Amino acid sequence: MNTTESALLLPLTATQAPEASKPLLEGIQKGFGFVPNLMATFANSPAVLKGYLALDAEWEKSAFTPQERTLVLLAASLENSCGYCTAAHSKIAKAFLKVPSKTVDAIRAGVPTGDERTDALVALVRELVSRRGHATPPAIGRFLAAGYTKPQVMELLLGIALKTISNYLDHINPSPLDAAFASEK
């Protein structure tokens, strides 16, 4: 069975989407240059699309750099076994945020990157996801020792929540991988 045959909901274009989703899809189109299939699937429910975009807007206001935010999303996607989001965030990290390929590849392989700060960030995210929020004191301690702050421990929850929504949607409603992300499959 292919992705389209197994989908509960199909990705929608701006002309097919409910009225409340149309301006949101237009904004995504302007930002990305296209509407990723996962976002186009969110468009089936204006409430879900609006909520996801609102959470994303707050996540972008966190104290993490754009590169760190993307690595958080990548680590959560890996831990949640979401191939679509893993490919998307790998591509975004490498192509647009100039995160070195060796760093992204190491994170995807589950091995240390060689950068203590990045490794502490990724390890805490993966532990929070895999242990359903029950991070160990040593993981939090390494995160703080790497130069992150206590409020950033909380801010990680925004990124994890954001990815949980999209990862779980892709689990229950697989989206076709966009050509823009295919090189990172």
Image (cartoon, rainbow, N blue to C red):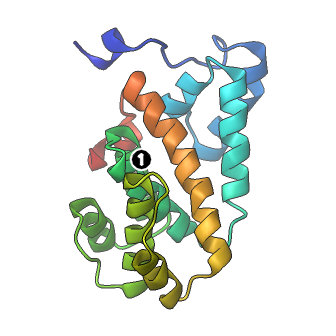
Q: Which residue is mark 1?
A: 88
Count of numbered marks: 1
96 left or right, relative to 158: left
Q: Quarter-wise, where is residue 158 in the image?
A: bottom right
74 left or right, relative to 21: left
In this rendering, the answer to whether 106 lies above or below 150 is above
In this rendering, the answer to whether 119 lies above or below 146 is above
Q: Quadrant of the N terminus?
A: top left
Q: Quarter-wise, where is residue 13 in the image?
A: top right
Q: Quadrant of the C terminus?
A: top left
Camera-nearest residue between 94 and 154: 154
The residue located at (22%, 71%) in the rendering is 111
The residue located at (36%, 36%) in the rendering is 179
Residue 42 picture location, percent across and down: 58, 26
In this rendering, the answer to whether 85 lies above or below 121 is above
Q: Quarter-wise, where is residue 35 in the image?
A: top right
Residue 60 picture location, percent across and down: 67, 60
Report if residue 175 is visible in the image: no
The kind of secondary structure element at disc 1 is helix
Report if residue 132 is visible in the image: yes
The residue located at (29%, 77%) in the rendering is 113
- Residue type for callout 1: Ala
Mark 1 Cα-neighbour bin, 10 Å: few <14, some 14–19, many ≥20:
many
Residue 24 picture location, percent across and down: 73, 31
Residue 142 picture location, percent across and down: 43, 84
Camera-nearest residue between 11 and 145: 145
